[in-house]
Image: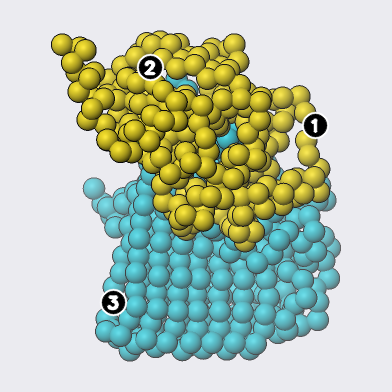
Chain colours: A cyan, B yellow
Amino acid sequence: MSKSIFNSFYQYLIENYRLPEDNQRNDVTWPKALLEHKQKAFEFFKTHGFPSTKQEDWKYTNLAGPLQQVFHIPANDTVADLKTAIANASIKDAHAYHIVLLNGKWQRELSDPLPDGVHFLDGKDALHHYYAEEYFASLADPTGVSLVAMNTAFIPAFNLLHIQKSTDRPLHIMHFYAANEPAFLPERLLLVAEESVQTQWIDTFHQLTSAPVFINYVAEQFLKEHVAMDIFLINQLPSSAVVFHHSETYLHSQSTYHHVNFSFPGAGFIRNNINARMQGSSSEANLWGLYLSGGQQLVDNHTIVDHQVASCNSNEWYKGILQDKSTGVFNGKIFVEKGAQKTNAFQKNNAILLSREATVHAKPQLEIFADDVKCSHGSTVGQMNEDALFYLRTRGLSELTARQLLIEAFAYDILSKVQNDAVAHHVMQLLRQHLHVESALPAGA
Amino acid sequence: MLQIKNLQASVNGEPILKGVDLEVKAGEIHAIMGPNGSGKSTLASVLAGNELYEVTGGEVWFEGKNLLEMAPEIRAREGLFMAFQYPVEIPGVSNINFLKTALAEIREHRGLPPLSAKEFMQRLKEKQELVEFNASLVNRSLNEGFSGGEKKRNEILQLAMLEPKLAILDETDSGLDIDALRIVANGVNKLRSKDNAFIIITHYQRLLQYIIPDYVHVLYDGRIIKSGTKELAYELEEKGYDWIKESVQASLS
Ligand SMILES: Nc1ncnc2c1ncn2[C@@H]1O[C@H](COP(=O)(O)OP(=O)(O)OP(=O)(O)O)[C@@H](O)[C@H]1O
Ligand SMILES: [Mg+2]
């Protein structure tokens, strides 16, 4: 078996690839330097295709099934009723600035005016921004991930979020997707947070139609000195969605990156690559994740914490609650490079299986090339604690309530990392909504 | 209140209870003593409804209802309470929320209106004082990181909050220092009434100096082999169990 998949979707993409100048859909011109990235990325994708399970990082995550479908490059912009969708997606009491995107395209009229010092740019404003030439494709593309190359090659344009001042309220980027036929929807973000900025950012993903979509979202994020950035990622996509999400974050010295990643039953296939590169000393990366899976869902979280310089801290904790026939994959890489002395790097992952037919594959992967390092990792997979369940029932709690309480307690470790009550509450509601403890009872109970 | 008739139970096919008979009336306190491994905790667990233990014979009636047909939570709501020998630590479940939920479910079952937040806090404060339970502990996760004695006291706090008809205390005294023992015993004495009853499992006559039992039973090898009044506890303290074992073996052969 080959290390790559070259299927009919691949053939379709290769045949239909156009550089932006030739693309009639596109009204923006790409600067020459950026076009070169695109050209190179296309060549890379053409050579490598989609990764097969022969590749170590895709061992348990088989793209052959979800990409059997030929997802078409949409010919026109889809129209959708976004007003209702925005109302449904907004988070009560979060008082966030809404930034609304449809299939990756900024919907300026439907978005909130942004506070002073926060700029959201699209189209030629983004393409010709001074940061575009400096940063675009400089962080994600060198990782050699062919789905990132696919993104770079096929995006019609990208968005740039430039934060120069701390925000008083969180930003909320709503990513909506809509298509009337199977569609390939690549989306790209470049984020630059300037020195000493503090901000919270909620990133939610929604689909408005029922045709299958392949969402390929890549974010390159640059945090300058002393930045404190919280990102709360909430994936609410339905079963018709196949999702590839790759975020690559560069941390300058003394910056703090706090990423909390939530997903729920829905998207049939989710692959997240969440990578943090600590390139400035005394920076800190915290990666937290909670997934509740269900149905036949596959949820794969691959993370990289890359300690490139000395005196940085990282904490990572991913927890999974698996229902039905779902599969969870976790891979946590910690790199401590040669000069990265006085590194503290901690990693944990725990999963509970609420069904006999659910599976988890978890793998910590530590590569340490420095000697003055504090590093630990731990991994558990288990069922619900029957002793605890019995204890709660002897106090009058029904079996359902007791199970619910224990699952919420399990989730609480990650929910408590969300330093925003409105968001934490919202996520708890989603958890309750998607948790079906009834069917999680052991047979015969 | 409680009638146990020829109760037999096994775990993994291994018989543990081999025919227990016991009757407890409202207002009474029964002590159950017996050597390690004789089946005392098993009896408590079977009464509480632990599905790990298979009931292989006999009957149990609680207030005229068939206890063995009820799920553990129904037994609790009907008024049965067991203070565990080894209370479970449950990280992430706050002690106070847990108590609130438990009390609400029990009150609903009994047709009582839910307590308001204020009434609940009032009651909690009162019961906390009764068992001299450190206020900071109620805000922590259920039993997580509690010392052995704190866990036992938390069991008694729950008992005080939930007001059961029948409470089974499984070695609540072991692991308690002398002051805590007195506090727990005091609590039980204040909670006892002509309408409720207690079964107290213990190894030590010491607790029974504070909580005076109406009856003392000896459980041995899955059966109650001797019953008496509080004097029996003194006798056991002095002579151990061998003399009873011998008399039982003699009567069997
Ligand atoms: N879950 C279990 N699995 C296997 N054996 C068990 C289990 N529970 C109890 N037993 C066995 O049943 C017997 C009675 O145990 P039990 O805990 O009821 O004794 P006990 O009288 O409470 O003892 P102690 O005074 O030490 O608390 C013991 O031999 C014990 O090993
Ligand atoms: Mg015992």
Image point 65% across, 40% down: which residue?
A: B190
B116 up-or-down from A77: above or below = above
Q: Amino acid at mark 2?
A: Val
Label 1 in the same subunit as label 3: no
What residue does disc 3 label?
A368
Q: Position of residue A369 (x, y in %)?
A: 27, 81
A184 up-or-down from A347: above or below = above
Q: Amino acid at mark 3?
A: Ile
- Is label 3 in a helix, a strand or a loop? strand
Q: Amino acid at mark 1?
A: Pro
- Nearer the observer: mark 2 or 3; the answer is 2
Q: Position of residue A159 (x, y in %)?
A: 65, 70
Image point 67% across, 80% down: which residue?
A: A198
Label placed on residue B20: 2
For the residue pair B171 and B91, the one nearer the viewer reads as B171
For the residue pair A251 and A444, the one nearer the viewer reads as A444
Image point 61% across, 79% down: which residue?
A: A228
What residue does disc 1 label?
B113
Q: Position of residue B10 (x, y in %)?
A: 31, 21
Q: Earlier in the sequence, mark 1 or mark 2?
A: 2
Q: CA distance from mark 2 to mark 3?
A: 62 Å
Q: Quadrant of residue B218?
A: top left
Residue contact at pointers 1 and 2, CB within 8 angstroms: no
Judge left or right: residue A42 versus residue A131: left
Residue contact at pointers 1 and 3, CB within 8 angstroms: no
- Label 1 within 8 A of ligand 2 by Cβ: no
